[in-house]
Structures are given as C-alpha cells and as structure tokens.
Image: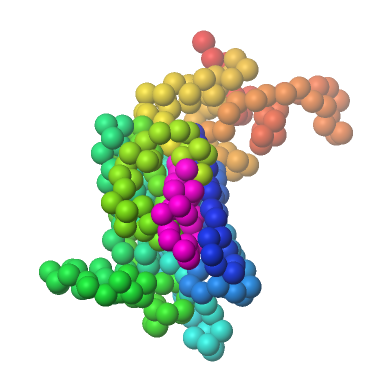
Amino acid sequence: MSTYATAQHIGSRSHQCDATATRSTGDGGRAFVLLDGIGSSDDVRAWTRAQARRIADLTARTLQPHEAITQVQDEITAHAGWQDEVPGACAVAAVTGPDQLLRVAWIGDCRAYLLSPDGHLQRLTTDHNIRAEIEATGRKAVWPWSRNIVTRCVGHGDAGTALEPEWTAVHDRSGTRLLLASDGCYEPIEDAAGDLGAELADLDPAGCAEHLVRLALALGGERPDNATCMVVDFPDASAAEASTGRVLYAHGCVLMQDGCSGCDAAEDTPHPADPITMRSPWASRMVKRCRTCAQPPARRIHKSA
C-alpha cells in the first residue's frame, strides 16, 4: 500500500485553482491526480476541482490515465459553446495496479518526478508550453514568458484547441517516491538552481510535501503562484509481498482464488479474509460469512495450514 500526502498554498493569487484528487482502484492500487487551473476565479476553481475528481474516477476505473484525460476532454467538447464557457487546466495523473507498474499521463506543464532508492531523480514528463517547443528545435528560449503559455490543456483556456495527452510507464516502482507538482511548486526551486532530488529525499510524504510548497513560496519572489504538490511513497517489492501475505492469512483464513462478484476486481487481488459469525433473518442457525462481501465461507474461504 502506498503512502501519500498533498500540500498547497494560494501564493499571491486571488483563488487557489490547483486541485488534487485520489481514488482507490479496488485492487490495492490508487490513482493520483493534480490539476493546475488556468486563470484565477470562482469558476476556474470550481471547474478544476470537478475535473480533478472526474479524471481520478476514470483513472481508477480503467487504470489508463491517458484515456481518462482524453475522455474528459471528449466530454467537454461534446457540448456546444464549450470554447466560450469552459476554462482550462494542465493535468498530470498517475495510477498503480496490482503489479509494480506505474502509469503516468499528462497534458500541459504539470510535472511528475520519480526518486529511486539510490537517490536518482527522473523526470517523467515533458512540458507542453512555448518554451519546450522552442528548446525542442535546439534553440534557447530567451523570453521568460514563453514557459507561461501552454500549448496543450484540458478544456480550452489559453491553449486554444486541445490536443491529446502524453503518457509513459515505469515497470518497477519498488521503493520509489513519486512527486506530482504544479509549475508554481517546481519552477521557483528550478529557477534558484535548487536540487529537487535532495529536497525530495528527506522527511515523510506529509513533511516533504509541506517543505516543497514552503520552499517554493520562499523562492517565488514578490508574486508567487499557486503551489501544489503530491508526494507518494511506494514500498519495496519484498515488503509489499510480506504485507500481502499477512493480510491474506488474517483471522487464520485465506480467500480462495475463485473471483468474487461482490468485491474482487480480479482473481489475483482478493480482499482481506475477515469471516464473522452471524444469523440472517431467514436462517434457522448461525452461519459464517465474509464481513466484506457476505459470501459463505464454504464458497469463499478455506482454512490456512
């Protein structure tokens, strides 16, 4: 099970238009989403929060964050007049499954970083803004404002017509730490030539997230932007396997690998065994059932050795 925390600060803006959301995938994984709204108003704040929740729901359901972002964009553009009514937001989404795979998708200039157990920091995303497009041609972006004009986003906003997100996958997340961040969080640290990997290495997720936001505000000059980040710790594979073994043998029982329409998402991801003794209103005697799915133990559970 991953451990995660979020921190944010409004900076000098009139509204906090960054938003985060998480959802359980139902098979031991979790979806993590961070959005950076374009603009600063009540409408942008409410819309960005709603889209963060929607992307998290879809990502948790499909385990495909790039498809979730694309579906949200399709839902937005299906309504007439969306260009004039819908704000825009940059987005990054990540999801874990029952294996060690980590999927990440993004659109705009929100970023994802992965810190390995040996201290190596890997940036998983590329920015969708004017600066990145100029630098992709081998030239240097000399205008400071070039990084503030995004070329892709969810919705409309300053990006004009929206384009598809990019995505990547990490095949071994064991023992790593994931950082999702808005530009208001990573840019001040980057501009000050700070070592983001070193700043990310210490403290627990909650302390680290709070530290990064406070550092961004301290380095952000007279008008700091909304600053938001999410820090996620993934256990190493050996620890995760040991934990799973303890869960499956809880209460001296282990679930059979036969699937369960009541609560299992897949045959190889059973819920913790938790049988209880109960009497149904229609039954003449006490019976044992699983506390989570209410299936009889004869069908669902066998005794461990």
In the rendered image of this protein, does residue 221 appear above or below residue 102? below
215 lies left or right of 53: left
Q: Is residue 214 magenta?
A: yes
Residue nearest the viewer, comparing 285 with 34:
34
Question: Does residue 285 appear anywhere in the picture?
Answer: yes
Count of numbered marks: 0
Residue 158: x and y, percent?
Answer: 42, 80
> Where does the image place residue 301, in percent across and percent down from the top left?
59, 24
Give coordinates of residue 133: x percent, y percent: 23, 72
Q: Is residue 131 magenta?
A: no
**In the drawing, does residue 89 fall left or right of residue 132?**
right
Q: Which residues are magenta?
A: 211-232
Extreme front residue here?
Answer: 222
- In the image: residue 6, left or right of residue 67: right
The structure's colour scheme is rainbow
Q: Residue at x 56, y 60 (%)?
A: 10
Viewed as shown, does residue 15 lie left or right of 110? right
| Relative to 290, residue 193 above or below | below
